[in-house]
Amino acid sequence: MTDWHSTGFPAADAKDDFTRARRREQWARVATRLRGRPGDVRVLLPFDEVVTALGLRGKRRVGERLVGIDQIVGSVDRTRDFDRSFRPTSSVARARFERIATMARRGEDLPPVDLYRVGRGKDALYFVLDGHHRIAVASALGRGAINARVTEILTQLPVGPGLLASDLVTKTHERLFTERVPLPEEVRDAVLLRDPADYARLAEGVEAWGFRVMQQTGEPLDRQAVAARWWTDEYEPAIQLLRKAGLIGPPATHRTATAAHTSPAGTDAVDVSAPDGNGTTDAEAYLWLAEQRYLLLRSHRWDEKAMDRLRSERPRARRGQRRRGRP
């Protein structure tokens, strides 16, 4: 049941379980500070804020199943009694923790916990509706999974690995961008911007591009049509031209870029060269260079003249590059 020593006295062992778990939380807190990682890397994610940022679409009951404890990262009631690994952060939870730990050590059956699930597969995140202490005890006893009644929460945006509370502002702007620029689902994840304000700037640029197209063609287009045409007629050709001209580097996957975006220490850099020689994403490069193209040439066209002029200019560092350390 556990790799820790058992004296054969469940109540006494339960007290030791809490003490060890509490000590581990204290050491984890010190290690987080020494490594220079953001404080919210250890904080349980607030369910309501996560769902608001991602955009609620609906929910459905999944039923009872085993859930990996390391996938349970948040809470509905915003408790501060446990950290993200469900180690107790104070002595407030001691009495209930020890009572449940005693029952578990005696082999008594515990009711399943109630969880909300956001996302699917290995990237799914779970939030506790009821059962914080049972999860904490299971974790303290070295159990990798717990029986749970699961309700799936459907959201507009998918969740990504390593989501932190500090990422929710960016996720909110990303969701608003997808509402204004509803790209096809298969390419939606390719637009990654690390400065939240850039999503609004890019959305305005796409809407302006769509307005120019409608003026030129006399054809009314809804948001879905504008987004699809912008992607195929403007964004993809522009990225190919910029890459061919050596103004941006090879493509990075969305997951790689996200890892750099959420990396607390900023150690996982995106393997894409920015115009100023630093790491950036394709969407950031497109946005920056499109603005420079217009400032230099008063043109919205991508052609050799634009490439030559952009290549000859020495671009300034982007704001997003000064934010490399953000989670």
Image: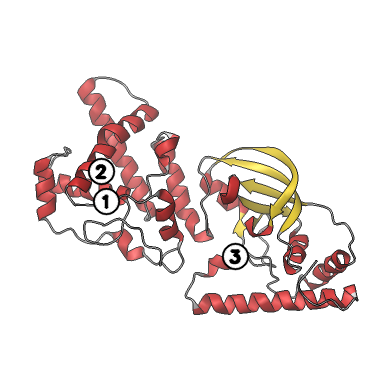
Amino acid type, residue under disc 2 in the picture: Ile
**Residue at coordinates 44% horizontally, 58% vertically from top-left?**
259
One can see residue 73 in this view = no
Q: For the N terminus, give its image quadrant.
A: bottom right
Q: Secondary structure at mark 2?
A: helix
First along the sequence among labels 3 and 2: 3
Residue 277, x across and y down, in percent: 23, 61
Residue 103, x across and y down, in percent: 88, 65
Circle 2 packing at 10 Å, graded few (<14), some (14-19), many (20+), is: many
**Residue at coordinates 39% horizontally, 29% vertically from top-left?**
224
Amino acid type, residue under disc 3 in the picture: Val
**Mark on residue 285?**
1
| Picture quadrant of residue 263 | bottom left
Circles 1 and 3: CB atoms closer than 8 Å: no
In space, the residues marked 1 and 3 are separated at their CA atoms by 33 Å
Q: Secondary structure at mark 3?
A: loop
Residue located farthest toward the top when viewing the structure as drawn: 218
Amino acid type, residue under disc 1 in the picture: Ala
First along the sequence among labels 1 and 3: 3
Q: Nearer the viewer, mark 3 or mark 2?
A: 2
In space, the residues marked 1 and 2 are separated at their CA atoms by 8 Å
Compared with residue 213, is residue 309 higher up or lower down, i.e. above or below? below
**Mark on residue 212?**
none
**Residue at coordinates 57% horizontally, 52% vertically from top-left?**
49
Q: For the C terminus, give its image quadrant.
A: bottom left
Compared with residue 141, is residue 224 higher up or lower down, i.e. above or below? above
Read off the residue under disc 2.
239
Residue 72, x across and y down, in percent: 65, 56
| Picture quadrant of residue 190 | top left
Circles 1 and 2: CB atoms closer than 8 Å: yes
Read off the residue under disc 3.
43
Give whichever of 240, 111 is nearer the camera: 240
